[in-house]
Image (cartoon, rainbow, N blue to C red):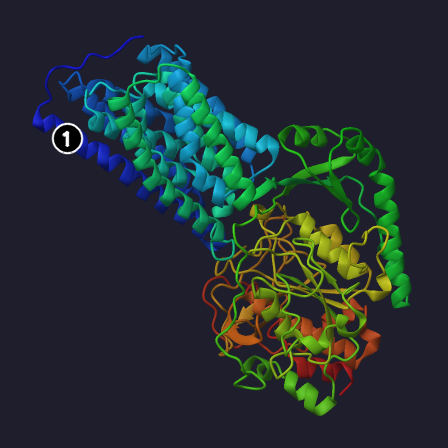
């Protein structure tokens, strides 16, 4: 093996410059990438700041330029032979960021493709490192197995707090981690002749490599945890194999146990990010102790004379890791899935000619089921032959399939498949999320300002109409079924939960709400005590959001349940009962690309619901104030009634998304109408109340108004065109202020045809 012979002495100035650079690089890179990631998250949270989405790409390219310049200067001007090899390794590591920019072009949920690119990137520079560094890869079992024992001992925080993806995900993550470890080991240097200086040099090297190797948030974890293990690499010197094994396992841990896409701030309260940060902090402290222990053991006890002791230590570490996962961690595999949209979608337009509501619903349901069973038969048989797990859908002719990149490539080549999109799944958390109750236990103002602004209280008082006989379908984070404002209006209160509650996320059998979003939005639709627009209506519920994330399949699960509810544990394609369908659907959610949707992914579903006579109300989203920010299903569709948000003074909320719709090329004007959506007081979990803001709060007002309309005039039930026209014709003219995009006037890209007016709408329906 070639060893580096250090020069006898380092000048104080050279040491100062080296230490300053070695400390600055890890700290600076983490801070830099945190800023870049935050900018990308801001773009993800609001489409009005979409240009910030390119921050990571531009930033990584800038990093390459700066680090190459810095390392080149240090290498070029250094006269100390003990430091030049370290600066050379930094120079090569800085260059890794150039091709690594391609990782930043990957969209969300591309984990397997990302791992493949990481592996290819690592081996490209491994070949370069062999040529330049000329290190031997002679394998010595004893130090390598010892390194494995220490590495397995080091990664327990990630095994405890994280969760694995699919088996292919985990395998690719391991390979990507080991490839990273080999690259780092080939570049690592011990030429400084001092454990502490070598450790600092390797720390900077690992920070440079990790910040380039990770993407979509993973770079933050790698840049945070890897530098401390630079000292472990120094302790393992001169064994390249041992360093490769150690760094490879340590790097693989965060890749395996955390999906970086889930770090996004769009998810609930950032739960995954907080658990990952906890694991990283523990690992940093733990890593320092392990690195020091490795150095002391190597210095005082020497290398093990036989393989037996390190092998026993590795087996003990491996057993301990498995015990942590199975006893305290999140067992099993939790990979993302694929949503396969068939080319041949059903035509249910004949339903519009059917006058009887139940017959119309039955026709749509039966036609969709028959079409799905026929057109999916060949694909289902193929998947069955290969043992692939899948779930068929009918409201969109589609299947959700468990599989990765190879399965995706096969499905995309089939002539009966239109396209394959992502269907991401959240990995489980170490602890359940606590409910988010409000601060109030009573309703201070009844009715609320939002109720009086649209005149709903006048409808109750003058016409005696409260939404009686209308069923609201609520698809959201759930519903607190015991809330006093909602409990008595649950259709399952007397009937039971069969046909009235469905939870495709967690399989709960009765109404509940982890997040609180659904409890709040439903309260605005029909909550008692003056918080809801149509307190006489009833509701059925479905959970399509978990920690504020859904996917095409889960959204479809709930929409299918609203068309044809089924009993607990029932089969939607066989046990649905369209006679129990909801009348009006409130949808205070959107399905952006991070959740897997493309602009047309759920379009057949809402068209079928409209044909069945079910009114679909959708909140436009919170990506304002720029134009063309109504950009995600369902709000962009012509078949739904989309709602923007105003405040108590009648001004359009800055966050309210604006039209026209550009992502599908339609140029459609959205929203259709506006409603209160700022500081709206409503129900929250655990029997509490509070105010929230968002277009999520605006849409429920319109769902409640439609319930009042259909309750007041049953001939309107299922008549979408007449109902929409009444809402448009009776809308209050908009006189408020608009910040940002506002094109046109009635309809406007900011507020549609005006502000919904429950009183005028019901009066018009009654001919008064």
- Considering the image in quadrants, where does the N terminus appear? top left
- Where 739 falls versus 196 (above or below)? below
Tally of marks: 1
Residue appearing at x 77%, y 80% in the figure:
468
* Between 407 and 642, the one nearer to me in the picture: 407
Badge 1 is on which residue? 17
Tell me residue 724's x, y (percent): 72, 70
648 sits to left or right of 306: right
Residue 663 shows in this picture: yes
* Between 376 and 46, the one nearer to me in the picture: 376
Tell me residue 580's x, y (percent): 83, 66
731 sits to left or right of 735: right
Residue 745 shows in this picture: no
Tell me residue 506's x, y (percent): 65, 54
The answer to which image quadrant residue 756 occupies is bottom right
- Where 303 falls versus 724 (above or below)? above
The answer to which image quadrant residue 765 occupies is bottom right
- Considering the image in quadrants, where does the C terminus appear? bottom right
């Amino acid at each position: 093996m070639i060893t580096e012979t250090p020069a006898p002495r380092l000048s104080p100035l050279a040491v100062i410059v080296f230490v300053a650079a070695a400390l600055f690089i890890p700290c600076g890179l983490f801070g830099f990438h945190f800023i870049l990631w935050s900018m990308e998250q801001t773009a993800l949270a609001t489409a009005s700041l979409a240009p910030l989405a390119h921050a990571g790409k531009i930033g990584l390219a800038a990093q390459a330029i700066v680090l190459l310049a810095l390392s080149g200067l240090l290498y070029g001007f250094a006269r100390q032979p003990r430091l030049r090899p370290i600066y050379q390794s930094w120079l090569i590591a800085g260059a890794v960021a150039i091709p690594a920019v391609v990782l930043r072009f990957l969209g969300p949920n591309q984990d397997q493709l990302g791992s493949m690119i990481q592996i290819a990137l690592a081996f490209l520079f491994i070949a370069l490192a062999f040529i330049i560094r000329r290190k031997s890869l002679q394998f010595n079992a004893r130090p390598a197995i010892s390194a494995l024992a220490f590495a397995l001992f080091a990664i327990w925080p990630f095994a405890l707090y994280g969760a694995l993806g699919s088996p292919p995900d985990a395998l690719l993550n391991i390979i990507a981690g080991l490839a990273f470890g080999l690259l780092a080991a080939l570049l690592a240097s011990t030429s400084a002749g001092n454990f502490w200086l070598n450790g600092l040099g390797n720390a900077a090297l690992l920070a440079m490599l990790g910040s380039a190797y990770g993407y979509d948030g993973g770079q933050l974890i790698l840049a945070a945890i890897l530098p401390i293990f630079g000292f472990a690499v120094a302790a393992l010197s001169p064994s390249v194999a041992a360093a490769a094994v150690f760094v490879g396992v340590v790097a693989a841990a965060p890749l395996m146990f955390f999906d970086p896409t889930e770090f996004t701030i769009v998810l609930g309260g950032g739960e995954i990010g907080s658990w990952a940060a906890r694991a990283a902090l523990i690992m940093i402290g733990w890593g320092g102790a392990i690195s020091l222990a490795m150095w002391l053991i190597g210095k005082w006890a020497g290398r093990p004379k036989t393989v037996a002791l390190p092998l026993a230590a590795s087996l003990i570490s491996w057993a301990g890791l498995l015990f942590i996962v199975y006893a305290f961690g999140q067992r099993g595999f939790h990979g993302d899935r694929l949503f396969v949209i068939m080319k041949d979608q059903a035509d249910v337009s004949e339903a519009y000619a059917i006058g009887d509501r139940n017959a119309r619903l039955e026709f749509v349901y039966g036609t969709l089921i028959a079409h799905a069973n026929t057109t999916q038969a060949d694909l289902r048989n193929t998947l069955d032959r290969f043992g692939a797990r899948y779930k068929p859908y009918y409201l969109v002719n589609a299947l959700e399939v468990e599989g990765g990149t190879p399965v995706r490539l096969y499905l995309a080549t089939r002539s009966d498949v239109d396209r394959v999109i992502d269907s991401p799944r959240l990995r489980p958390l170490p602890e359940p999320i606590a409910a988010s109750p409000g601060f109030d236990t009573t309703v201070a103002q009844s009715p609320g300002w939002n109720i009086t602004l649209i005149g709903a209280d006048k409808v109750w008082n003058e016409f005696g109409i409260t939404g009686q006989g209308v069923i609201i379908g609520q698809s959201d984070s759930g519903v607190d079924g015991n809330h006093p404002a909602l409990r008595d209006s649950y259709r399952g209160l007397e009937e039971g939960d069969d046909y009235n509650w469905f939870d495709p996320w967690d399989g709960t059998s009765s109404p509940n709400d982890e997040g609180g979003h659904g409890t709040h939005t439903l309260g605005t639709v029909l909550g008692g005590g003056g918080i809801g627009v149509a307190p006489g209506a009833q509701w059925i519920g479905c959970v399509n959001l978990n920690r504020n994330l859904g996917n095409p399949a889960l959204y479809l699960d709930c929409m299918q349940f609203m068309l044809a509810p089924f009993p607990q544990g029932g089969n939607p394609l066989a046990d649905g009962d369209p006679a129990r369908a909801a009348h009006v659907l409130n949808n205070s959610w959107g399905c952006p690309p991070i959740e897997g949707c493309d602009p047309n992914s759920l379009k057949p579903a809402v068209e079928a619901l409209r044909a069945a006579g079910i009114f679909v109300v959708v909140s436009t989203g919170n990506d304002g104030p720029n134009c063309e920010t109504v950009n995600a299903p369902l709000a962009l569709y012509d078949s739904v009634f989309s709602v923007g948000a105003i405040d108590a003074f009648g001004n359009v909320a800055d966050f309210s998304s604006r039209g026209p719709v550009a992502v599908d090329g339609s140029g459609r004007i959205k929203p259709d109408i506006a409603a209160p959506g700022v500081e709206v007081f409503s129900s929250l979990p655990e029997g509490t109340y509070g105010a929230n803001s968002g277009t999520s709060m605006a849409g429920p007002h319109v769902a409640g108004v439609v319930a009042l309309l259909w309750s007041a005039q049953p001939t309107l039930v299922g008549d979408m065109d007449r109902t929409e026209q009444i809402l448009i014709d009776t809308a209050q003219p908009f006189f408020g202020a608009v910040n940002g995009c506002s094109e046109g006037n009635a309809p406007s890209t900011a507020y549609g045809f005006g502000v919904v007016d429950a009183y005028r709408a019901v009066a018009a329906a009654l001919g008064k």
